Amino acid sequence: MQYVSTRGLAAPQSFSEILLGGLAPDGGLYLPVEYPRVSGAELDAWRKLSYADLAFEVLRKFATDIPEADLKALTHKTYTAEIYRNAHSSDDAARITPLRVLEEKDGKKLILQGLSNGPTLAFKDMAMQLLGNLFEYALAKQNAELNIFGATSGDTGSAAEYAMRGKKGIRVFMLSPHKKMSAFQTAQMFSLQDPNIFNIAVEGVFDDCQDMVKAVSNDLDFKARHKIGTVNSINWARVVAQVVYYFRGYLSATTSNDQKVSFTVPSGNFGNICAGHIARMMGLPIDKLVAATNENDVLDEFFRTGVYRVRKSAETYHTSSPSMDISKASNFERFIFDLLDRNAERVRALFAKVETQGGFDLSGKPGSDGDEFRKIEHYGFESGKSIHQDRITTIRDVHAKYGVTIDTHTADGVKVAREHLKPGVPMIVLETALPAKFNETIQEALGQEAERPAGFENIESLPQRFTVMAPDVVQVKKFIAERTGL
Ligand SMILES: *Cc1c(COP(=O)(O)O)cnc(C)c1O
């Protein structure tokens, strides 16, 4: 399987060649040259597989240059009940992404798929844990090293650190805004004592951290010398690892392949739902893919109107579902590439326009950039939006009716899913975090603390290991150089 860039000006590469990288050299994102198809016979055979075996079956269609025995060992090392132990019961932990039926009424069925039972209590572990093992494997083969350098305001940084801790050949340097993350998030990251993990608390805000990452990324010489890489959400291996749980969700919610299901996905950078789009393109019988946004409704606006309009920082709201607070959706270009029948020249023009004019318009109206909005239905996409008060109401209602506490992001999903229920088609909402991570809002909604999984009870009182630093690029480069010894 070869991978091509959405902008069409980069040489095709293999899975292993793009594994450690991010953007293609032409600024585009990688996608397989064509989507592998899954037959009905394969789907039937997959129904009884464990999560690890299912992950192997899906991944082998994409990672064709990794020997199958190695790939199987990697998925079995990653998807274990031990790593996904934060589930409600040991049965659920063994299932990795257990389904829970919330409601069945008038032929309409609302289901939660738990994706947040990994070490950091959010769905990013699903892909990042595999990435950690894939990276270690690939680096060992090349006898190489990688220094991951990034900035985080919460979920991504901790998922990356828990995936890379103790991995041979890998160090993580993670910037976060000093004293700006929640006590729980800070403790999760800073309590790691692994010698290959470096937490740097920057005296500034998240944007200062990101500027430092950009400055280092633009210094190509430094980057090459110190083998700097990233693990951001555009990484292809992360997207493909997420495809697996759409298969698992479908297979667990149905008994035969003539049935369909829909998914509602709390969305920010479009990484999660992009994996759903790929599963659907592979032939998984998905009816609708519903993108749920919070007040930052870039994606909802596009799926309602065909207009993609990125937001300025001042227009990007800090909400109670903070992992969806985005101003542009970094994986969206992958879907647009397919929507435009893979016309890379047009993708190039549209995303150049995003840079110069802040967006594009595919509504088909006079003066627009195209009329592909009419084809959205063919790809199954729908959308909806949820605001703070909706989250509060939904958390309360789900707690009262079904005795289940959901987090704020999942609440955005449930709110929007309820507006898209159809008789005869189960609706699966992807649960993207556990409520313990967003306890302040759970308090507001329920007047009580969110339950903490075992082992997290006293996380805030564990010893912390981190370095405070001014927002100074020279200083951070020196810090990295001293520790990479290169
Ligand atoms: C990252 C994240 C999201 C958004 O996922 P995307 O892949 O960026 O669309 C939603 N919920 C939680 C809890 C997250 O951490």
Image (tube, rainbow, N blue to C red):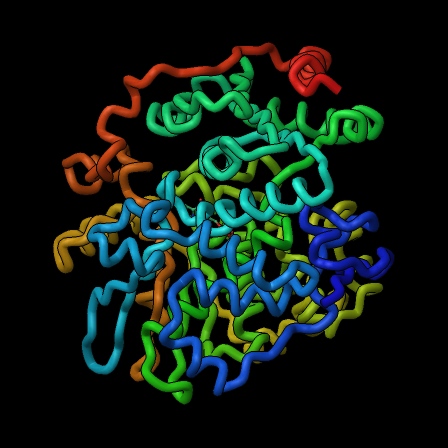
Could you say which is closer to the camera, residue 280 or residue 193? Answer: 193
Provide residue 392's location: percent of width, then percent of height: 26, 46
Residue at image coords 45%, 70%: 247
Q: Left or right? Give the position of 264 relative to 355.
A: left
Provide residue 383's location: percent of width, then percent of height: 47, 64
Q: Quadrant of the N terminus?
A: bottom right
Q: Quadrant of residue 344?
A: bottom right
Q: Left or right? Give the position of 181 relative to 334.
A: left
Above or below 67: residue 443:
above
Could you say which is closer to the camera, residue 284 or residue 415? Answer: 284
Residue at image coords 61%, 69%: 61
Q: Is residue 408 visible?
A: no
Q: Quadrant of residue 302?
A: bottom right
Single out the residue that lies furthest toward the front. Answer: 69
Q: Quadrant of the C terminus?
A: top right
Q: Left or right? Give the position of 276 relative to 448.
A: right
Provide residue 265's location: percent of width, then percent of height: 43, 59
Q: Quadrant of residue 408?
A: top left
